[in-house]
Amino acid sequence: METKFCEFCGNKVAIDAVICPKCGKQLEELKAENHNQNPQVIINNSNVLDGNVARKKCDKWVAFLLCFFLGWLGVHKFYEGKAGLGVLYMFTFGLFGIGLLVDIITILCKPNPYYV
Ligand SMILES: [Zn+2]
Protein backbone atom coordinates (compact mmCIF):
# COMPACT_ATOMS: atom_id res chain seq x y z
CA MET A 1 0.00 0.00 0.00
CA GLU A 2 1.38 3.37 -1.04
CA THR A 3 1.84 5.96 1.67
CA LYS A 4 2.74 9.61 2.05
CA PHE A 5 3.54 11.77 5.04
CA CYS A 6 1.20 14.26 6.64
CA GLU A 7 2.59 17.77 6.11
CA PHE A 8 1.25 18.86 9.50
CA CYS A 9 2.32 16.14 11.91
CA GLY A 10 4.53 13.86 9.80
CA ASN A 11 2.26 10.87 10.34
CA LYS A 12 2.38 8.18 7.64
CA VAL A 13 -0.98 8.08 5.85
CA ALA A 14 -2.46 6.32 2.84
CA ILE A 15 -1.49 7.95 -0.47
CA ASP A 16 -5.11 8.83 -1.26
CA ALA A 17 -6.11 9.88 2.27
CA VAL A 18 -7.91 13.21 2.35
CA ILE A 19 -7.72 13.68 6.10
CA CYS A 20 -4.80 12.75 8.35
CA PRO A 21 -6.08 10.16 10.87
CA LYS A 22 -3.62 11.37 13.51
CA CYS A 23 -4.04 15.14 13.54
CA GLY A 24 -7.29 15.41 11.55
CA LYS A 25 -5.94 18.06 9.20
CA GLN A 26 -7.08 18.10 5.57
CA LEU A 27 -4.28 16.88 3.31
CA GLU A 28 -5.85 17.09 -0.13
CA GLU A 29 -8.21 19.49 -1.79
CA LEU A 30 -11.55 17.73 -1.92
CA LYS A 31 -12.20 18.72 -5.52
CA ALA A 32 -9.62 20.50 -7.64
CA GLU A 33 -12.25 21.97 -9.95
CA ASN A 34 -13.83 23.84 -7.04
CA HIS A 35 -10.99 26.38 -7.21
CA ASN A 36 -12.54 28.33 -10.04
CA GLN A 37 -16.09 28.22 -8.79
CA ASN A 38 -17.64 31.26 -7.15
CA PRO A 39 -19.52 30.88 -3.84
CA GLN A 40 -22.90 30.94 -5.57
CA VAL A 41 -22.07 27.80 -7.50
CA ILE A 42 -20.86 26.04 -4.34
CA ILE A 43 -24.15 26.87 -2.62
CA ASN A 44 -25.96 25.33 -5.57
CA ASN A 45 -23.82 22.22 -5.22
CA SER A 46 -24.76 21.82 -1.57
CA ASN A 47 -28.41 21.94 -2.58
CA VAL A 48 -27.70 19.04 -4.89
CA LEU A 49 -26.09 17.18 -1.98
CA ASP A 50 -29.21 17.73 0.11
CA GLY A 51 -31.21 16.02 -2.61
CA ASN A 52 -28.91 12.99 -2.41
CA VAL A 53 -28.00 13.39 -6.06
CA ALA A 54 -24.29 13.78 -5.40
CA ARG A 55 -22.88 11.46 -2.77
CA LYS A 56 -19.52 11.32 -1.05
CA LYS A 57 -17.13 8.85 -2.61
CA CYS A 58 -15.19 6.76 -0.07
CA ASP A 59 -12.29 4.41 -0.62
CA LYS A 60 -13.15 1.05 0.94
CA TRP A 61 -9.64 0.28 2.15
CA VAL A 62 -9.00 3.73 3.57
CA ALA A 63 -12.27 3.42 5.50
CA PHE A 64 -11.37 -0.11 6.61
CA LEU A 65 -7.93 0.90 7.90
CA LEU A 66 -9.32 3.97 9.65
CA CYS A 67 -12.07 1.84 11.19
CA PHE A 68 -9.71 -0.97 12.18
CA PHE A 69 -7.02 1.18 13.80
CA LEU A 70 -8.86 4.35 14.78
CA GLY A 71 -12.48 3.24 14.73
CA TRP A 72 -12.84 3.64 18.50
CA LEU A 73 -12.24 7.35 17.88
CA GLY A 74 -14.88 7.40 15.12
CA VAL A 75 -12.30 8.47 12.53
CA HIS A 76 -13.96 6.37 9.79
CA LYS A 77 -17.24 8.17 10.51
CA PHE A 78 -15.52 11.52 10.03
CA TYR A 79 -14.02 10.12 6.81
CA GLU A 80 -17.53 9.28 5.60
CA GLY A 81 -18.62 12.81 6.49
CA LYS A 82 -20.74 11.65 9.43
CA ALA A 83 -19.24 13.96 12.03
CA GLY A 84 -22.11 13.50 14.50
CA LEU A 85 -21.64 9.75 14.61
CA GLY A 86 -17.88 10.29 14.77
CA VAL A 87 -18.25 12.33 17.95
CA LEU A 88 -20.62 9.70 19.37
CA TYR A 89 -18.07 6.96 18.65
CA MET A 90 -15.33 9.07 20.22
CA PHE A 91 -17.21 9.28 23.52
CA THR A 92 -18.48 5.69 23.58
CA PHE A 93 -15.36 3.96 22.16
CA GLY A 94 -17.16 2.87 18.99
CA LEU A 95 -20.51 2.28 20.69
CA PHE A 96 -18.68 0.13 23.23
CA GLY A 97 -17.01 -1.85 20.46
CA ILE A 98 -20.27 -3.13 19.03
CA GLY A 99 -20.75 -0.35 16.49
CA LEU A 100 -17.11 -0.66 15.59
CA LEU A 101 -17.39 -4.40 14.92
CA VAL A 102 -20.52 -3.90 12.82
CA ASP A 103 -18.80 -1.13 10.85
CA ILE A 104 -15.73 -3.26 10.08
CA ILE A 105 -17.98 -6.01 8.68
CA THR A 106 -20.16 -3.49 6.84
CA ILE A 107 -17.15 -1.80 5.22
CA LEU A 108 -15.74 -5.16 4.13
CA CYS A 109 -19.06 -5.96 2.40
CA LYS A 110 -19.03 -2.70 0.43
CA PRO A 111 -17.79 -2.25 -3.13
CA ASN A 112 -14.69 -0.15 -3.76
CA PRO A 113 -15.13 2.73 -4.00
CA TYR A 114 -18.43 3.13 -2.19
CA TYR A 115 -20.72 6.11 -1.76
CA VAL A 116 -22.31 7.44 1.41
ZN1 LIG B 1 -1.27 14.75 10.53
Image: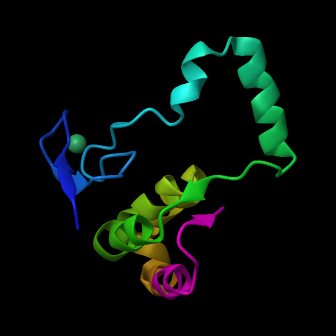
Of all residues, the one furthest to the right in this rendering is: 51
Residue 47: image location, x then y, percent: 84, 34
Q: In which quarter of the image is residue 57?
A: bottom right
Q: Where is residue 81 in the image (x, y as percent from the top left)?
A: 57, 51
Residue at the limit of the structure toward the left, as seen here: 10
84 vs 39, left or right, is left
- Res 72 visible: no
- For the image shown, how many numbered marks are present on the structure? 0
Work out whether residue 51 or residue 102 is closer to the camera in this orientation and state it: 51
Q: Position of residue 103 (x, y in %)?
A: 51, 79
Is residue 68 something one can see in this rendering?
Answer: yes
Horizontally, residue 34 falls left or right of residue 9, namely right
* Image point (66%, 61%), residue name: 116
Q: What colour scheme has been applied to the protein in the rendered image? A: rainbow
Tell me, yes or no, whether the highlighted magenta stretch contains residue 25.
no
Magenta range is: 102-116
Name above or below for residue 48 compared with residue 21. above
Q: Which of 10 and 32 is in front in this view?
A: 32
Q: From the viewer's perspective, is residue 70 above or below residue 54?
A: below
**Residue at 75% in and 48% down:** 54
Residue occupying image coordinates x 12% and y 42%:
10
Side (left or right) of 107 relative to 23? right
Q: Please name whichever residue, 87 or 7, is drawn nearer the observer in this view of the structure.
A: 7
**65 with respect to 34 (left or right):** left
The percent position of residue 38, horizontal first and vertical second, equals 68, 11
Q: Check the image and report above or below for 14 versus 41.
A: below
Tell me which residue sits at (55%, 18%) in the image. Answer: 35
Q: Quadrant of the N terminus?
A: bottom left
| Quadrant hosting ligand 1 | top left
